[in-house]
Image (tube, grey):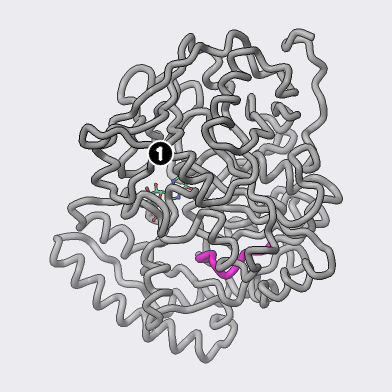
C-alpha cells in the first residue's frame, strides 16, 4: 500500500515497543530535546501498562510539551503520567525541586481540569530544594565566568553543588519541620546574601538580597499544596515493584549532558543517563531491564560546548526551521547538525539502551542527500571513540558518510516496514552502527504520527 494511503493506526502500545513486562526507563541519547515527551506520554498513558511514572533527575531546567486533543500542556517538573488517569507520579530524590515552580505547574494543570493531588503525585522527602539564591547564583556564575556554560538559569548547578557540599542544603522532608525550616532558611539566606552580594560587587553585577520574611511566607503557602505529597518515594516504588506494579522512569535532559558521562563541563549537574535512575529513585539496577533510548534523526544542542556536526550554514538553518528547533524552557534557538553516530554509540552504550526510538524523522524527508558522522578526525587521527575532553571534542572533524534522501514522504507512514526505501536504509544504518534495534520512528508531532513494527 502506498504510504500516503495507509490507514492510520491507533497510537502504538508499549507491547509494540517490546515492553510487555518489567520496569523501563526512557532516556535521551543526545544533548536533550530529543522528543522524549512524546514517547513517555505514549507509554505512560497506555492503560494497563505502567502504574508509576517517576522522574529521577534534573529540575525545572527540563521541559516538554504534550498535546492531548486540542490542549497543550507544558511540563517541567511534573512527570508526564500526570495527564493520565490512574497513574501515580513520583518526583524522585535525584530531582531538585523549585517549590514555587512546582506549585505554579500544579495550579496550571488544575486550571486545565487535570487532577493533581496527594494520591497521584508523590514527592521524595530526600529531594533537594531550589531556593531563589540558587537561581541568583546560577546567573552570577554565568555572568562572571570566562567560559559560560549557557545554563537555563534555573538554579540547577548551585542546588546540586549545595547538595554535595551538605552545609547549606535543605531537602523537601526538612521543609515539613517548621522549626527547622525557619532556622535553616534564615541561616542559609544570611550566608548566601553575604556571599553573593560580595561576588556581584566584585564583578560590577547586580544582586537582590533574598528576603527571609518573604521566602518563609511563600514557603508556607507552597507547603499547603506540597506537604501532603511528600513521602519516602524509594520505598514506595520498591514496595510497589515487589507487588508486581510497573514503573516507568522518565529521564530529563540527556546522556551527553550527564555530569559524569557528558561533555563536561558543558553539561548539567545530574546523572541524566539511565545510570541516574538508580541513585535518583532508590531502585536498584537489576530492577530496570528496559532502557528506551531516544534520539533525533539529526543532532541539536542548546547552550555552549563542542558539537562536532554543528552546521552553521543554510543547511543548519533549514533543519532548525523545519524541526522548529527552539527551546521549550528558554525559547533559545537550538544549534543543529547531522546525526553523530560516534556520540550515539557512546551514549547508547553508557545508558545501556535496549532499543532506539528515532524522532523527527520527517524533518529530513525533503533532503536529497543526508550526511551521517561515522568517525572523527582528531589531530589528524581517525577515531570512532567519543573523547572525554571537551577540548579534544572541539577539535573533532566529522568523517561523514553521505546517503541518499528518503525518496518519499514519511509523515503518513505508521509501520516501519512501509517507510520509503531511503528512510528504511537510514534507520538500518543507525541500527547497524549502534547494534541496538530501532523500534519506533516518529514522523510528526501528533501522538499517532508514529511508525512501529
Ligand atoms: P543547567 O541544567 O541549567 O545547569 O544547564 C546546563 C546545560 O545543559 C546548558 O547547556 C543547558 O542548555 C543544557 N540543558 C539543561 N537542560 C536541558 C534540556 O532539557 N534540554 C536541552 N539542554 C538542556
Which image quarter is the C terminus in? top right
Magenta run includes residue 91: yes
Pick out the residue farthest to the bottom.
Answer: 179
Q: Position of residue 57 (x, y in %)?
A: 53, 60
Q: Which element is circle 1 on?
A: strand
Q: Position of residue 160 (x, y in %)?
A: 42, 68
Magenta run includes residue 129: no
Q: Is residue 332 left or right of residue 44?
A: left
In the depicted view, which residue is nearer to us: 205 or 94?
Answer: 94
- Answer yes or no: is residue 138 visible: yes
Residue at the spot x=71%, y=33% of the render? 447
Is residue 117 depicted above or below 339 in this figure? below
In the depicted view, which residue is nearer to us: 302 or 375?
Answer: 375
Classify mark 1: residues with Cα within 10 Å, few (<14), some (14-19) or many (20+): many
Q: Which residue is mark 1?
A: 301
In the picture, residue 23 is in which quadrant? bottom right
Is residue 366 depicted above or below 187 in this figure? above
**Any atom of ligand 1 within 8 Å of the CB at mark 1?**
yes
In the depicted view, which residue is nearer to us: 337 or 158?
Answer: 337
Residue at the spot x=55%, y=15% of the render? 365
Is residue 131 depicted above or below 438 in this figure? below
Q: Position of residue 345 (x, y in %)?
A: 48, 40
- Answer yes or no: is residue 110 visible: no
Query: Over which residues does the magenta segment extend?
Result: 90-97
Is residue 65 depicted above or below 363 in this figure? below
Amino acid at each position: 500500500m502506498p504510504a500516503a494511503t495507509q490507514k492510520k493506526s491507533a497510537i502504538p502500545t508499549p507491547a509494540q515497543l517490546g515492553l510487555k513486562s518489567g520496569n523501563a526507563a526512557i532516556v535521551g541519547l543526545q544533548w536533550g530535546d530529543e522528543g522524549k515527551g512524546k514517547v513517555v506520554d505514549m507509554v505512560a498513558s497506555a492503560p494497563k501498562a505502567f502504574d508509576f511514572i517517576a522522574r529521577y533527575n534534573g529540575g525545572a531546567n527540563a521541559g516538554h510539551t504534550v498535546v492531548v486533543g486540542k490542549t497543550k500542556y507544558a511540563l517541567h517538573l511534573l512527570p508526564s503520567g500526570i495527564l493520565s488517569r490512574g497513574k501515580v507520579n513520583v518526583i524522585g530524590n535525584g530531582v531538585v525541586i523549585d517549590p514555587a515552580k512546582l506549585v505554579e505547574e500544579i495550579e496550571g494543570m488544575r486550571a486545565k481540569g487535570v487532577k493533581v493531588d496527594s494520591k497521584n503525585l508523590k514527592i521524595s522527602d530526600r529531594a533537594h530544594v531550589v531556593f531563589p539564591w540558587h537561581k541568583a547564583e546560577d546567573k552570577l556564575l554565568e555572568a562572571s565566568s570566562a567560559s559560560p556554560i549557557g545554563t537555563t538559569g534555573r538554579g540547577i548547578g548551585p542546588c546540586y553543588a549545595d547538595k554535595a557540599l551538605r552545609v547549606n542544603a535543605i531537602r523537601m522532608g526538612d521543609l515539613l519541620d517548621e522549626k527547622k525550616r525557619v532556622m535553616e532558611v534564615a541561616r542559609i539566606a544570611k550566608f548566601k546574601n553575604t556571599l553573593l552580594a560580595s561576588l556581584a560587587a566584585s564583578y560590577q553585577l547586580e544582586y537582590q538580597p533574598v528576603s527571609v520574611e518573604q521566602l518563609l511566607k511563600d514557603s508556607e503557602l507552597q507547603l499547603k499544596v506540597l506537604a501532603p505529597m511528600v513521602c519516602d518515594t524509594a520505598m514506595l516504588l520498591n514496595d510497589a515493584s515487589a507487588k508486581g506494579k510497573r514503573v516507568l522512569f522518565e529521564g530529563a535532559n540527556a546522556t551527553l549532558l550527564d555530569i559524569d558521562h557528558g561533555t563536561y563541563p558543558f553539561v548539567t549537574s545530574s546523572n541524566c543517563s539511565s545510570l541516574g535512575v538508580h541513585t535518583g529513585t532508590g531502585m536498584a539496577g537489576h530492577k530496570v531491564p528496559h532502557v528506551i533510548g531516544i534520539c533525533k534523526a539529526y543532532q541539536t544542542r542548546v547552550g555552549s560546548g563542542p558539537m562536532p556536526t554543528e552546521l552553521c550554514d543554510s543547511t543548519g538553518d533549514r533543519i532548525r526551521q523545519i524541526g522548529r528547533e527552539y527551546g521549550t524552557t528558554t525559547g533559545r534557538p537550538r544549534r543543529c547538525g547531522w546525526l553523530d553516530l560516534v556520540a550515539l554509540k557512546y551514549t547508547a552504550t553508557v545508558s545501556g539502551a535496549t532499543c532506539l526510538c528515532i524522532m523527527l524523522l520527517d524533518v529530513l524527508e525533503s533532503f536529497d542527500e543526508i550526511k551521517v558522522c561515522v568517525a572523527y578526525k582528531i589531530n589528524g587521527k581517525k577515531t570512532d571513540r567519543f573523547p572525554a575532553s571537551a577540548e579534544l571534542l572541539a577539535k573533532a572533524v566529522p568523517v561523514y558518510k553521505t546517503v541518499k534522501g528518503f525518496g518519499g514522504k514519511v509523515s503518513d507512514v505508521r509501520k516501519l516496514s512501509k517507510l520509503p526505501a531511503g528512510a528504511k536504509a537510514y534507520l538500518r544504518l543507525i541500527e547497524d552502527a549502534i547494534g541496538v534495534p530501532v523500534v519506533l520512528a516518529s514522523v510528526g508531532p501528533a501522538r499517532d504520527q508514529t511508525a512501529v513494527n
